[in-house]
Image (cartoon, coloured by chain):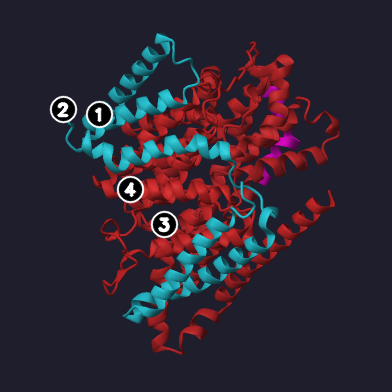
Chain colours: A red, B cyan
Amino acid sequence: MEFLYYFDDVFTLWAFGMLLLGTIFGLILGATPGLSPTMAVALAIPFTFKMEPAHGLILLGALYTSTVAGGAVSAILLKIPGAPANIATTLDGHAMARNGDGKRALQLSFLASLFGGVAGVLLLIFATPILAKWALVFGPSESFWIAILGVTVIGTLGSNSVIKGLLAGCIGLWISTIGFDDILGTQRFIFHSSLAGGINIIPALIGLFAIPQVISMFAKGRTRDDLEVLSIKPHPLRKAITEVGRRTRALGIGTSVGAIIGLIPGVGGQIAGLVAYDQTRNFSPDREKFGTGHSEGIIAAESANNSMVGPSLVPLLTLSIPGSPTAAVLLGGLIIHGIFPGPNIFRDYPEVVWPFINSMLIGQILMCVFGLMIAGLAANVARVPRAVMAAVVLALAVFGSYSVQLSMDDVFVMLILGAGMYFLARYGYSAAPLVLGLILGPIAEGNFVEGAMIAAAQNGVLPYFFTGTLNLVLIAIVLGSIVYSVWLELKNRNQGRAL
Amino acid sequence: MHRFQHAIPAGLIAFVGLWVCFVSYTQTPAAAFAFPRLISTVFVVLALWTFFKVLRDGAAQDGGFNRQEIVNIAPGLALAVVYVFWGANFFGFYTGTALAFFILLTWYDPADHRQLRSWVMRAIITAGFIAVMYCLFALILNVYTPREIWS
């Protein structure tokens, strides 16, 4: 119950102000198609430099929570999911809005998000310290395999092609080695003077997540998006609360599916929403009503994608393995504030971590209240012309990257990595494993080198890294995730051929 | 587009993989390159696998570009490159950003360019955005930026 001691810290002027700001901006950004939660958090990191670490993280956490919920607004009113996590919401949410119940759909969506989100954060509060205590037994070899596990799981489960996912992870790991070697001070892969200090993580994150979105807006050319925002008729909130309370099956399935999927590194909210939607339909006696504006569909999808948020931070805070691409960006945010996640995080930084986690709990309530208040406005923001959006994101990316170290070199790296990532993404390579490789590379290398030194004084490198129960379990999970993903890919390919 | 367009990125990645592998195994001291050796070995195996698979499968691969997309992307990307690598330093951060912002807006705006109203709108949006950026970065965050050309 240590978290209760730090609740006061969320209600200071600055902390609560950041929470409010992050929630409102997150709802608006989330409702804007083309601006993903990951990109929103990446672009916000430079603004947190001069803040207290706890305040900066509260802002980033609020953005993460509310962008996922805000994505439901455009999914319901525009039939365009604000984020991949809201794809399943579109199915029944937009149909309900088309039937003239847009307000009801929004109310159900935000109430379900609140329920799922609170449940997810409670899991984060109670599961994280337990996992952290368990992770204390990890030595360098286990920590090395954990880092490799993070890259392979997100590279295999989170990508359409296993090989390309793993390849992207390798590219990320290689990029993380550019610069001077930490131990011997040797220059590695410095083919231009701007790389002498290595690749700074924040400009890299901004480039990898923001620039591909800008270029994909360029790719659509001078065409106009004729988006029709459906009008909202009043609907009593009391009725919506009663309806959500009655839909316990959808709420239960959505929340538990989201929480479980959030705990698995690399799977993400998109899968959570779709799996919860599908499972709720399977168990529902009204399954033929799904897709026609059925409330269970909205409740299942939204409770799932929000209950995923809290648990996705459990492996991040205890093992440094992000549960989703947005959590990976949050890891970057933690690192630039000098906070290195791991088993000792609650011992070393309780004054930062607990207010951050507590703020996510309060943030769920703010997200629901403000979501219901500004949903209509947020949907209209989604109609901002694509050209304006592209120019704004590009300028923010340039200013944000520059402000990290006041260096144009960082801006060059940001643009080159971002443009390269856009082209690679068009050929099936995803950014998430590359980012994971980039972030987890130094952790993997540090533990590899430390482990190799210990091994040299013992039985040698191979026995050190390949024996011991924990090492073998982790290696089995790494191999298992690869084999499972290959099997899944082959199965999908065969089904595609059969069709 | 050419049926083997996928071979270009796969080939480039394979080339980078081979280079990383070569550097890792030839540079000294070996201890500094132990981790790069490990990852570059996996990197080069996966990269060559992908490259030869692309050569074998050719057009069967998904994704890629069509000609229209390249035509659409080229001006915006060229402007972004000029802005980042030259404009921001030459004109100053805020002036360079304002110019790049306005040109991008004009190029990709589907509005009729013969109407004065659309030009005025774009100028107002640009001025408003730059004012917000100046307040945020120069006044609140105290970010020192390269000197402006007019100052």
Q: Say whether mark 3 and mark 1 are on the same chain.
A: no
Tag 1: residue type? Thr
- Viewer-side residue, A157 vs A215: A215
Q: Which amino acid type corresponds to the residue marked 4 in the rendered image?
A: Phe
Pointer 4: what residue? A412
Q: How far apart are marks 2 and 3 (CA)?
A: 46 Å
Q: Which residue has dot 3 on it? A: A341
Q: Earlier in the sequence, mark 4 or mark 3?
A: 3
**In this rendering, is residue A63 above or below A263?**
above
Dot 1 crowding, Cα within 10 Å, few <14, some 14–19, many 20+: some
User: What type is the residue that disc 3 sits on?
Assistant: Pro
For the residues labelled 1 and 3, the Cα–Cα distance comes to 40 Å
Residue drawn at point x = 60 percent, y = 39 percent: A84
* Callout 2: chain: B
- Which residues lie in the magenta part? A241-257
Q: Are marks 1 and 4 on the same chain?
A: no
Q: Do the residues labelled 2 and 1 touch (CB within 8 Å)?
A: yes
Amino acid type, residue under disc 2 in the picture: Trp
On whether residue A251 falls in the magenta region, the answer is yes
Kindly check if marks 1 and 3 are in contact, taking CB atoms under 8 A apart as contact: no
Q: Is B132 part of what is drawn in magenta? A: no
Estimate the x, y position of residue B3 in percent, counting from the top left. 64, 52
How much space separates mark 2 and mark 1, taking CA atoms?
9 Å
Q: Can residue A305 be seen in this view?
A: yes
Badge 4: few (under 14), some or many (20 or more) residues near its Cα, within 10 Å?
many
Disc 2: which residue:
B150
The spot of residue A244 in percent (x, y) is: 69, 28
Question: Which of the two labelled residues, at mark 2 and mark 1, occupies the earlier sequence position?
Answer: 1
Q: Which residue lies furthest to the left in this view?
A: B151
Query: In which quadrant will I find the C terminus of chain B?
Result: top left
> Which numbered disc covers residue B95?
1
